[in-house]
Structure formats: structure tokens, C-alpha cells
Image: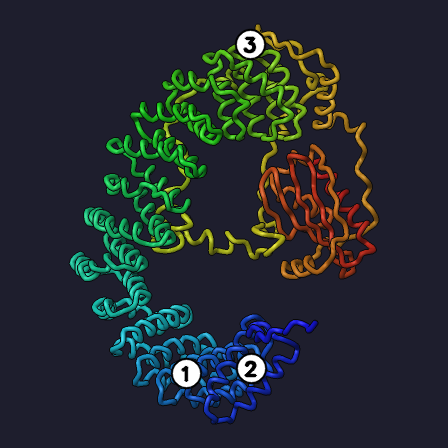
Amino acid sequence: MAPPAQSHRSPSPSQPSGKGEVSDLKMQLRQLAGSRAPGTDDSKRDLFKKVISYMTIGIDVSSVFSEMVMCSATSDIILKKMCYLYVGNYAKYNPDLALLTINFLQRDCKDEDPMIRGLALRSLGSLRVPNLVEYLVGPLGSGLKDGNSYVRMVAAVGVLKLYHISVSTCIDADFPALLKHLMLNDPDAQVVANCLSALLEIWGLEASSSEEAARERETLISKPIIYYLLNRIKEFSEWAQCTVLELVSKYAPPDSNEIFDIMNLLEDRLQHANGAVVLATIKLFLQLTLSMTDVHQQVYERIKAPLLTLVSSGSPEQSYAVLSHLHLLVMRAPMWFASDYKHLYCQYNEPFYVKKMKLEMLTAVANESNTYEIVTELCEYAANVDIPIARESIRAVGKIALEQYDVNAIVDRLLQFLEMEKDYVTAETLVLVKDLLRKYPQWSHDCIAVIGNISSNNVQEPKAKAALIWMLGEYAQDMQDAPYALEGLIDDWDDETSPEVRLHLLTAVMKCFFRRPPETQKALGSALAAGLSDMHQDVHDRALFYYRLLQHNVSVANSVVNPTKQAVSVFADTQSSEIKDRIFDEFNSLSVLYQKPCYMFTDKEHQGPFAFSEELGNMSIGVDDQRVEANDEDHLLSTTRNEDSLPQQTQGSLLVSFDQTEPAHAQQTNSVIDDIFGLGLSSSPAPAPAPLLKLNAKAVLDPTTFQQKWRQLPVSTSQEVSISPQGVAAMTSAQALVRHMQLDSIHCIASGGQAPNFKLFFFAQKENEPSNFLVECIINLSTSKAQIKIKVDDETASQAFSALFQSALSTFGMT
């Protein structure tokens, strides 16, 4: 039987068929270099495509550089483009090879075809080789005077490229003056725009060191140039129009008549199809009228229609960008957008981020006249199959309720959400009802009648469960089953993973005890015992505080836990007015999308000096922050051993029958208390003595070296160690541990996180030896554990350093 015939498929141009593929290409290109036979250009195209495809996927084809240059002697524009692309890619890495391209690029800069002249000039400027700038000056000068607008346009950008390669060469050749002349006299609008962009960057960078450049930059925002650009703005492309409008926004008209002239001249830009042009025009209008209150308000009215049109006519990404700016305006002047609330209703096919922004805007524009319609629409979203949108809708209803005076109908709507019997709806509603009761206590009767029917077993989310517990404690007198519901929650204490819930539970039981003592005595004893045994420091401290407060005086405890409360009038705003004003000043920028001023995501003090791409993330570097936070546990240490045992009876007339039927449990609680307060340290093992390894107290390691070593070195030691209760209590911030480890000559290079999770990177060096120890330490205060990874230059010292590090960590909080 004959073997099957093999298919003769040609290999993919992006996949070399063997190691000799590049050599074959080189040979074929050399054969075609001087050929003038028919079809040569087509053959060159195929070979050039292979070279470019190899270069694109990262295969080194620099060996065919000379052959590519020899084959560039052609009038085929496509071949020229591919050759320029190849040359521009390899010239910056191989300056010596770039010399081979100078002759043919300079020759092409004088070609009869303006397209080739422009492409050659662009490629010549893209070489970015400092030693070749002398060859760029002549073609640039000729290009700025070329008769074709495309060549002049490329030359204007080429001047900016030359400036970044060699500032002195660009300035000495007087190219900025040529650009200015070209900007004011060239008939082609794109040439004018390129000249303007180049001059703005050059004079902006030079202004700090040259008075002449500073003066020239000021002339760009003078009245003659501003009006010259505004009168030609319709000729510019969208990108150029945005550049002009940004420049005009820096111009300060001397009187109101000139302001109106500029606004009338740009009125039609508000109807532009490009969103960037519309936003740039709106920014200009708002800035021009800041000092004219009445006109400024009219601008809000005028810009509504263009913005709403952009929201509905563009892509989801454009809609979100425009909505972000619209949201900023709504927050500043909600009354001007209140009548257009229907434009902010969500569409079924919109992505989540657009719907979320619309919900925030609906919340902002709600007032007495439109609240009913908006809340009705939001209630429809609450039944949406999209759970995140349903959650956001319920939150929006709650925000509106907190900002309105007449909340009758809104409260009824919120309580109806609880009847939907959906976990996420119930959870969000409980959180909002809690806030409503804090602001409107008069609604407690209606709310409690519904809340009392909710079983805590059906609420799993920590914030919702905490809200339910708060209401059980705050309104225990009016909720018949409150003590028994709390008792059931205390029975499940060990299964509750959220410290927030356990903290609320302690407080709620205390409140319930003072209102209904007989029914809550046992629950309170169990709660305090469980709280004192809790490994979370905040929970333990609160239980200990309540316990000692009851020992001291029951009446005082009642006044502390159940003080006379006033309704909350205003909830804390998420952003200060100063921050909002800063964002408004940066209108039409990323600041609006991020909802924070630019310095918060550009300045180094907010970014950190560096960020490790993988391991370190967004951690703070060094130990510059030396703020010491007060530790409240110091106030709890003045106690005797007798106070550590649970009392059988409190002071005053109220009897507290703590559970005395579990002496083993009580002994366990006493043991935990003894450990926490240092009263039973004799029974605990002493920290291991520090091994004989001397470290350099003045060790220095720069972040870049640390990162390189961390990636290169293997893990020498990886283990989990326990942190003492004293260490957990002392870990108020990462800096607390940083300062402690410095005492043992172990230095921190990066730290981050917040309670209960911290991540730190340490380094140390042997005394009188260039041997480094690198440590990654991940701390979880909830479990009192630390995950440690150690990497070392000298493997023989690994165990000694590991023991030293653990010894230093074990003494944290005890000194």
C-alpha cells in the first residue's frame, strides 16, 4: 500500500521553518538587491513581509539589515514603508547599523514623490541616535520649507523629535522660530496644529531655564494668536481643535465682551460629533464664566443637551466618560438637571459601569418634585436579574431617603424589599434601614414590626448581620424576641468569622441586658466569656472593657452603653468640597473618571518611590512615617488577678448570673486573660535565645537590587510562625513592627496593608560581609500567624538568620 501523499502547504510567514530561515532570507534579498527584472518588486514584497513578520514576533532579523537597505532603492511606496519600519526598529539598538541608512534616507528626502519625502524624513527623525543628529538638521530645514503640506507637517513633528534627542542642536538651528513663523503663516491647518503642539512642548520645557522661552510661551496665549487660532478652528482636525481649546482655556479675557465673543465663536463646537471637542468646549465655557454667576448658571442649562446627546449616541466607553463629567456637573448644580432625570434611566443593554454611574446621578438629582418617579424606577431595578445593579438600586433608594424630608413612601418601599425574600436584597435593605433609623427614629415602630420577623439565620453578609444585631440591641424593648435572637447568635460565636459582627453582638447584648435584665443575664455572661477568649484584639478589648465597666458600677455602665442619643442630621460626605473643586478645575481629564485630583495618582508621594511589579505591589517604602499610635491596652493593664475572673454579681441592684456551670470554660477564659495581660508568662515558654549571627546595623540595599535578588534567589526557608497576643495588640500599623525589627538590625524596604492583614519585606546583611538576607513576611492578625519566606546569598547562614528573625518577631510587643 502506497504511503499517503504529503501536502505541500507553504509554511506560515510568521513561523520560521528552521534555523536557516533568516539566512535564506538574507541570500534571497541579496540576489534581488540589484535586479531590475520584471516582477522584482513583487518578490521583494514577499520577502519584506516575512522579515517584518519575524521582527514583529520577536525573532532577531538584524543580520539582514544591509540587504534591506540595498533593496530600498525602489520607487514602490509599499516597499519603502516596510523598509522604513524595519530600519526604525533596529537603528536605535544598533547605532553602527544606523549609519548605513543615512545615505538612502537623505536621498529619499529629496525624492520627487512628496509621500516618500515625508516618510523618509519621519524615519530619519525616528532613528533617535544622538551621533546622527547632524544629518537630521539639513533635511528638517528643507522639510519646513517644502512645497507639500504633508512634508511640512512631518517636519514640524521632526523638530520636536530633534529637541528630545539634542536640545542644543534644536535651539542653535533656530527651529522654534521657524515653527512659529510656519504656525502663523502656513495655509494648511494640520501644519499649524503640529507647529503649535511642538512649540507648546518645547517652550514649556525650556521656560524653567530660559527667560526668552518663557516669554515666547506667554505670547502663545496672547490675544492676536488666540483669535488667529479661533478663527481657523473649523479647519482643524478633532485632535487639533482640542489642542487649541486647551490653549484658549489658559487665556484670560480682559472684559465680559471678549468672553461673549469667544463663546459665540465656539457655540457651534457644542454640536460637534466628537466627544473630546464638546468636553473641551464645555471646560472653556465653564472657566470663562466662573466670575459671572448668572452666566455660569446659564452655561449649565446650555450644555445639558449636547452632553445628553453624547451619552445616548456614543459607545459605552464614551458614554461612561461623558457621564462622569456630567455627574461632576450634577453634583455642583443638581437643580439644573433635575427636570432631565428620565434621560438617566438605565437601558437594558448598557454595561454595569454605565448603569452604576446613572444610578449615582439619579440619586443626586432627586428632589421633592421628582422623588416619587425616580424611586419607582429604582424599585424596578431592585428586581433585576443583574444582582450588582439590584444592590446599587437599593442603595440609591436609601441615599435618597436620607436626603429627603418626606420619606413616608420611601420607607414603605424599603420595607417591601424585605418581602422579596432574596438574600442580597434583604442584606442591602437591612443596612439602609439601620441608617434610616439613626436619622429618623420616629420610624422605628413601623420598621421594627417588619425587622422582627427576619431570622438571623437567613442573613449571611457581615454588614447586614451587624445592622440586624444593632437593631436588636437598640430596640430590644420593642422587639419581643430580641434577647432570644441574640442568645442564638452567641451560641454560634465560634462559627462567626467577621470581627465586625462579634463587636456589634457584644454591644447589642449589653444594651439588651440593661433593658431586659432577667432574659439577658445568661446571654451576657456567655458573650463576655466568648469575647475574652476571642483572638481578635478589638473584640477581646471590648469584652474586657464591658466586663470591667460592670465590675466598677452598673449605673455607669448603663450610661456608657445606653446614652441619650440624638438623631443623626448629616452623614459624613465621601469627598470634601476642596477635593471636588480640584476635580472641577481638572475638567476634561482623567481626574474626573478617577474622581480624584491628578496629584493623587501622579505624584510620587502618593505612588511611592517605586512599586515592585509582582511581589511588592502598592506598598510604602522605607520607614519615613514615624507616627506612633496610642495603644489603648495600656489603660487596661492596671488590674489585679482577682479582676480577671468572671464576677458572680455586679454592683448595684441588677443581678448578673454568669454561667457558672462550666468551670472548665471559665478556667480557659482565665488562662487566656492571664496570657494577654502577662500574668501567666511563667508557664509559657520563653523566647528562643538569639543565635550567634551578627548583622550590620547600618546595612543599605537599594530597591532595584532587592527586587532583582528576590526574583533570582530560590526560597531558602518557608514556614508559618505564631505571633504572641502582645504582638497582635502592638501591631497597630506596619511601622510598629518595622521599628521593632530595626532594633535587631533587620531593615524594612517595603510595607503595606491594613489590619488585620499586613505584608512587609525586610533585608539584613552580615557584619563585615557582603551577604544579604531577604525576607517576605505576611501577617494575619485574625489568626495570629505570620507566613515567612527567606532568601539568602549564603545558604550556610540561612538557619541562623531564620532563628534570629523568629526570635526578634517573638519579642514584638513585649518590650
Residues packed near mark 2 inside 10 Å, few (<14), some (14 to 19) or many (20 plus): some
Q: Is residue 677 visible?
A: yes
Q: Amino acid under label 1?
A: Ile
Q: Secondary structure at mark 1?
A: helix
Q: Amino acid under label 3?
A: Pro
Residue at 81 percent across and 44 percent down: it is 690
Q: From this view, report whether residue 327 is shown above or below residue 269.
A: above
Q: Which residue is mark 1?
A: 77
Nearer to me, 552 or 364 = 364
Residues packed near mark 1 inside 10 Å, few (<14), some (14 to 19) or many (20 plus): some
Q: In terms of sequence position, does the residue under pointer 2 or pointer 1 come before the other?
A: 1
Q: Quadrant of residue 662?
A: top right
Q: CA distance from mark 2 to mark 3?
A: 87 Å
Tags 2 and 3 in contact by the CB under 8 Å rule?
A: no
> What label sits on residue 95 in the rendered view?
2
The image position of residue 795, as x and y in percent, is: 80, 56
> What label sits on residue 517 in the rendered view?
3
